[in-house]
Amino acid sequence: MNDRFTSRIVSLVITLLYFISSFTGFSFGKKDPDPTLEAPLWPTWVHTHWVWENTGTQETINSVVNGYLERNIPVGAIIIDNPWSTEIGTFIPDPERYPDLAEHIDMYHDKDIKVMLWSTCMINEGSPTFEEGKAKGYFVSSGKTIKWWSGKGAFLDYTNPEAVEWWHRQMDIVLDMGIDGWKVDGADPYIMLMIPALGHDGHYISWKEYRDLFYRDFFEYSREKLGNDRVISVRPVNDPLLRAGLPIVFSDRDINFAGWVGDNDNDWGGMRHALNDMLASSRFNFVSYGSDIGGFRGGDEKHKDVFIRWAQLGAFAP
């Protein structure tokens, strides 16, 4: 079956489940924050120019960053996207792709460039930690696996304190390198397809409960370890089906200071999709958000006119 067609079917199922599931916080209207004179919770560097690539080697990342700097385009942060680890669900840098990741993080910091790493809530079956986590009961629904867009794996059970502590010990591998935050990707809606998703104590876990635990843990633990200038990048509003900016909110505003509106096609339709989701994000008062300029999907087909217009749109994104 065509991968894009399959992706749309999964998006349809998830979207339907979203609208029939009951959880608090859903609104088609604007959520106005309370007036405040308190200092903002986000560090100023979230408003700098971020770049990323997911070819996935030290050499390609250096090429991207240096390409901007050589053209006098400042770089405030680099996202090291998937794949960078030995397998999804470990925090061990791939020795072939990133043999000197700690040194590279220091090198970027010397240039005043922040470093973000991709991660998610999944532990794929190929991970060396999978069997341990399943045996100890650290996964949702006793380790039931599900096929998602980057393999087949289980969900970490954030309702189990022992599982979270186990997860944190693995996160420490790269937190101890001094990274500045995480691009936390949205595998969490797939938990609605588990039917039912059960925590270690047997209670049902809704998507809302799971996503709140998942994103907040990445945010709070990173700040606990390294300070309040650490951030996560999460989808604010992302409507993957109708692409009209339906208010499908992935994260809370108080922990998402630098979101991106998901994966878009690299054509005019993809740019409209991104713009619709950005406008919807503004109605929910997210602080800073943008999109992958030029899109993410679409293979090798190039659309120069779309890329130019998307770069102009990106210049006006917060």
Image (spheres, rainbow, N blue to C red):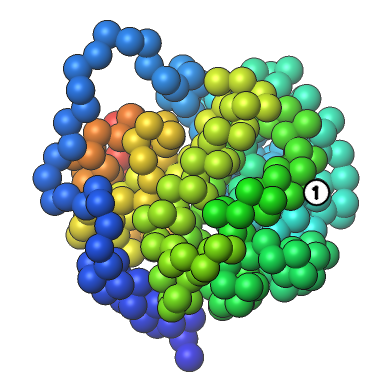
Nearest the eye: 209 or 316: 209
User: Which residue: 46% across, 17% down?
Assistant: 44
Above or below, comparing residue 49 to residue 117 in the picture: above
Q: x%, y% of residue 264? A: 39, 59
User: Which residue: 17% across, 50% down?
Assistant: 27
Using the rendered view, name the quadrant where residue 308 is placed.
Answer: top left
Furthest residue in direction front, as rendered = 201
User: Which residue: 41% across, 54% down?
Assistant: 209
Q: Is residue 167 visible?
A: no
As helix, strand or loop, the secondary structure at mark 1 comes to loop
Nearest the eye: 23 or 162: 162
User: Which residue: 33% across, 10% down?
Assistant: 38
Q: Which residue is mark 1?
A: 93
What's the amino acid at mark 1? Pro
Furthest residue in direction bottom, as rendered = 1
Above or below, comparing residue 229 to residue 151 in the picture: above
Above or below, comparing residue 173 to residue 196 in the picture: above
Give the total number of marks visible in the rendering: 1
Q: Is residue 122 left or right of residue 96?
A: left
Quadrant placement of the C terminus: top left
Q: x%, y% of residue 116? A: 62, 37
Q: x%, y% of residue 229? A: 56, 21
Q: x%, y% of residue 111? A: 69, 19
